[in-house]
Image (cartoon, rainbow, N blue to C red):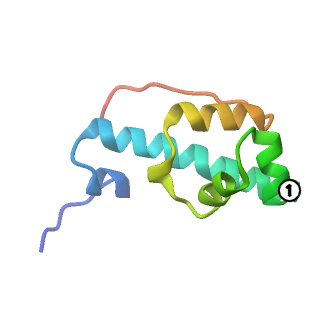
């Protein structure tokens, strides 16, 4: 058993640093959308209309099916939800 530690679960399970960063961004956007939908009290059907997607797509989002969403799609959904994204780029540790 390894004693190796990681800053994120994505660092532990993804093959490359780039893949881990992509997953961190996608998961952050998905969590923000899920929380926003819940706070607003939207049904999945209402969320779908507001986000410009189908209700099954919202269901996938709410169930955390991250492999079904790319960054472009998530950014479009976040903006459609009326949210704003800010990004910081830092030197790697």
* Left or right: 24 in relation to 10: right
In the displayed orientation, state which residue is furthest to the left. 1
Above or below, comparing residue 62 to residue 33 in the picture: below
Q: How many marks?
A: 1
Split into 4 quadrants, where in the image is the C terminus? Answer: top left
Residue denoted by label 1 = 42
The x, y position of residue 32, in whole percent, is: 66, 48
Q: Few, some or many C-alpha atoms within 10 Å of disc 1 (few <14, some 14-19, many ≥20)? A: few
The residue at the point 17 percent across, 67 percent down is 3
Above or below, comparing residue 39 to residue 49 in the picture: below
The x, y position of residue 27, in whole percent, is: 51, 49
* Left or right: 5 in relation to 43: left
The residue at the point 30 percent across, 50 percent down is 11
Q: Nearer the viewer, residue 18 or 71?
A: 71
Split into 4 quadrants, where in the image is the N terminus? Answer: bottom left
In the structure shown, which secondary structural element does the residue marked by tag 1 occupy? loop
Q: Nearer the viewer, residue 64 or 6?
A: 64
The x, y position of residue 16, in whole percent, is: 23, 41
The x, y position of residue 37, in whole percent, is: 78, 53
* Left or right: 43 in relation to 73: right
């Amino acid at each position: 058993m390894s004693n190796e530690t990681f800053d994120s679960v994505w660092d532990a399970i993804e093959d490359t640093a780039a893949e881990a960063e992509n997953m961190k961004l996608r998961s952050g956007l998905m969590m923000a959308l899920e929380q926003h939908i819940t706070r607003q009290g939207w049904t999945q059907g209402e969320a779908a209309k507001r986000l410009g997607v189908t209700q099954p797509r919202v269901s996938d989002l709410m169930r955390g099916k991250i492999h079904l969403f790319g960054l472009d799609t998530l950014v479009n959904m976040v903006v459609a939800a009326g949210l704003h994204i800010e990004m910081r780029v830092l030197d790697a540790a």
